[in-house]
Image (cartoon, helix red, strand yellow):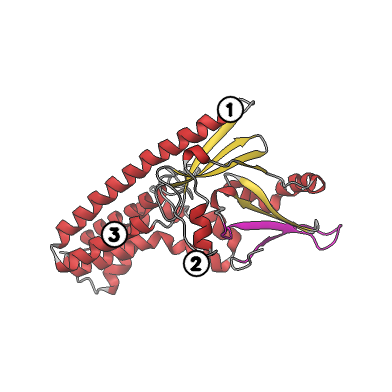
Amino acid sequence: MLVGAPRAWVGALSAAFPDIDYLLNWVDPVVYLDLHRGPTHSLLWMPLWALLLSIVLHVLTQRRYSFLALFQVCVLGISIHIMGDVITVYGTRIWVPVHDAAVTLSTTFIIDLIFTGIIVAGLLAGIRLNARRSARSALAILIVYVTLQAWLHSEAVDIARRYADTLPGNDTVHYAIPQPLSPLHWKLVVVEGDLYHEAYVKLYGQPIALAGDGWLRNILASYLPPGELQWTRINRWGNDRSTEQIARKVFLLPGLESFRRFAVLPVLYRADNGDCLWFTDLRFIIADMTPPFRYGLCQEQVTSEWTLRRLPRLEKQ
């Protein structure tokens, strides 16, 4: 039997297992972009990962626990992790190797403090109270919370759709992207050809006004009520005519193939005198914060090859 603390530890370990692919980020950021939330997050490969993890744990624990019991908990833990990633905006390739499409419900920000807080509260309650009842209660609250987020997502999508209807073109696509700090915060994006229309909305209530001029204040102040939205137009290739043509060309080069597969809303982030052109994904741009995914191609001389690079996370400009 696998009960109590051993079951909890095996569950926690298996639930964390899919993110082992994060180690690739230290090896090669491009390989990481290709494989993160791919094979280790596949529902089709999940039984294999659960089997391998169960074998390792069975050996490490000197066969103290039933292999079948270990396997069952590993299946549950890995599956929970995968489904927890599917609700975020990043995209999870749950059908690898049959299909490489990234699935996302776009209800939850990648790091949701309320979501995490419910899990932590359930764990702490399980230490002092009935563990099974605490776990069930926390799961029920999570389901209600994500259901609420799904409803808020539909509200945000409707606002973006109504704005898209005011544009002259008929070929538009609209998105509602969850944001940090509150489930009421959403980023709205309407795609019109190479033009992005972007707005930050707080679905209910007024923006939270903080004193000072810090990054937290700037983020909170950027989310406006639906009736006060400020739509910003962003050209996918930048605002400089001289850069636009080369940006289009560089973006289609083989070196950026991995980034093109990853980015849903690609946009030129920066052009360094034509020597380096950096791109990011508009999904991950948040007011007053440096986007995490900034890839580009650099050319030391006019006749030299373009080399793939990634801007360090701590480099703000």
Q: Residue at x 18, y 58 (%)?
A: 134
Q: Mark 3 or mark 2, which is nearer to you?
A: 3
- Residue 11 shows in the view: no
Q: What stretch of residues is rendered in magenta?
A: 288-312
The residue carrying pointer 3 sits among few (fewer than 14), some (14 to 19) or many (20 or more) residues within 10 Å by Cα, namely some
- Residue 143 inside the magenta-drawn segment: no
Q: How many marks?
A: 3
Q: Nearer the viewer, residue 203 or 23?
A: 203
Residue ID for mark 2: 23
Q: Between tags 3 and 1, which lies in front? A: 1
Nearer to me, 297 or 152: 152
Q: Is residue 299 magenta?
A: yes
**Quadrant of the snapshot with the C terminus:** bottom right
Q: Is residue 5 above or below residue 285?
A: below
- First in sequence: mark 3 vs mark 1: 3
Q: CA distance from mark 1 to mark 2?
A: 46 Å
**Mark 2 nearby-residue class (10 Å; few <14, some 14–19, many ≥20):** few
Task: Locate residue 75 relative to residue 87 in the image: left or right.
Answer: left
Identify the amino acid type marked 2. Leu
Residue lying at 59% horizontally and 40% vertically, measured from the top left: 231
x and y percentages locating residue 53 in the rendered image: 34, 63
Residue at the outermost left position: 130
Return the residue at label 3.
119
Question: Mark 1 highlights which residue?
Answer: 166
Q: Is residue 259 visible?
A: yes
